[in-house]
Image (cartoon, rainbow, N blue to C red):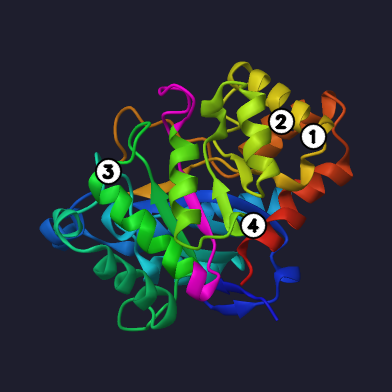
Amino acid sequence: MATAHTVLGEIPPSQMGITLTHEHLMIAWGSARYDRAPEYKPEPLIKEICDDLGAASKDHGVQTIIDVTTPDMGRDMEIMVEVSRRTNVNVIAGTGFYRQMAGIPLYFTMASSEQAEEMMLHDIQQGVGPNRVKCGVIKLAISQSKLLPAEEKVFRAAGRVQKKLGVPIVMHTTGWDLIEGGSGPRVATDLVVSEGGDPEHIQISHCEGARGNLPLLTELANRGFTLAFDRVGRSVEADLPVAAVVGGLIVGGFANRLTLSHDSVGAWFPATPGTYRKSGWSAAHKVFIPLLKKGGVSDKQIHQILVENPQRLFAF
């Protein structure tokens, strides 16, 4: 039986409930935790995260967070475990890599694809840190419309890992319309599938970037990929065109291929960047979902997007 692999252990998909499929409990760029170790005090970070997540759980029924923070982004498994325990919200942790232009460490630009594969297998099967907390999702990311060399290596590795284990993949995207006859997401997904990846367990994130390109979005959905609109809830003005696209996909029969999320960061170390504006994990329920309902999307369809689709996508 397929299960969702949380930081507290495996659970049946039926216990996932409302699921936000692209989030970050905490980000600590680069070597911040090492360089500033005396200042790294988890408790204030945990409290900040729990305040936001606890409110989303209490007020809107959020029950599962897919945390796609990779090691190079400052993933902290012990904070994930403690947040999950305190809030009673499931957390699924990510292995994998952020994009080469902003995340993949120098080591993995020099390492082989097989070494990247071994790292991901280790995180999923053996676990991370002294308590061996296991990951339940692979995060990948592209920098532009064509894969950079290190990205190609890790995308191939992820496809092989997914073929072996069935573990889901969440894919950060950009470059939707920069190359003739194609796009960054199409190039990236084709590569993963060529190594044995399964579209049924691959989420294409940041589909707002398609800017209403329904032919491309429907092509990807028809191939079995899940389309994530995961930067919603930031303002009514920003959400209106995105809600129109989501509504159009639902009318077209693709409610079973959609998820929603925020790409929000619960806490930063050593400090929140000055240009970052936090949406929080209640924003979709406060801003975006009311727009969908106003446009005629039913409660049943919203339940499918928030509950049923993540259960299919993140259990293996």
Of badges 4 and 1, the one in the foreground is 4
Counting from the top left corner in percent of width and height, residue 169 is at: 50, 57
- The image's mark for residue 246 is 2
Report the Cα–Cα distance between label 1 and label 3: 40 Å
Amino acid type assigned to the residue bearing label 1 in the image: Ile
- Which amino acid type corresponds to the residue marked 2 in the rendered image? Val
Residue 137, given in percent of the width and then of the height, sits at: 49, 63
Question: Foreground mark, 3 or 2?
Answer: 2
In the rendered view, tell whether residue 49 sits above or below residue 287: below
Give the label, 2 or 4, closer to the camera: 4
- Considering only order in the chain, which callout, 2 or 3, is on the residue closer to the N terminus? 2
Of residues 76 and 158, which is closer to you in this image?
158
Q: Which residues are magenta?
A: 163-183
* Labels 1, 3: front one: 1
* Residue beneath disc 3: 271
Q: Secondary structure at mark 4?
A: helix
Which residue in the protein does label 4 denote? 200
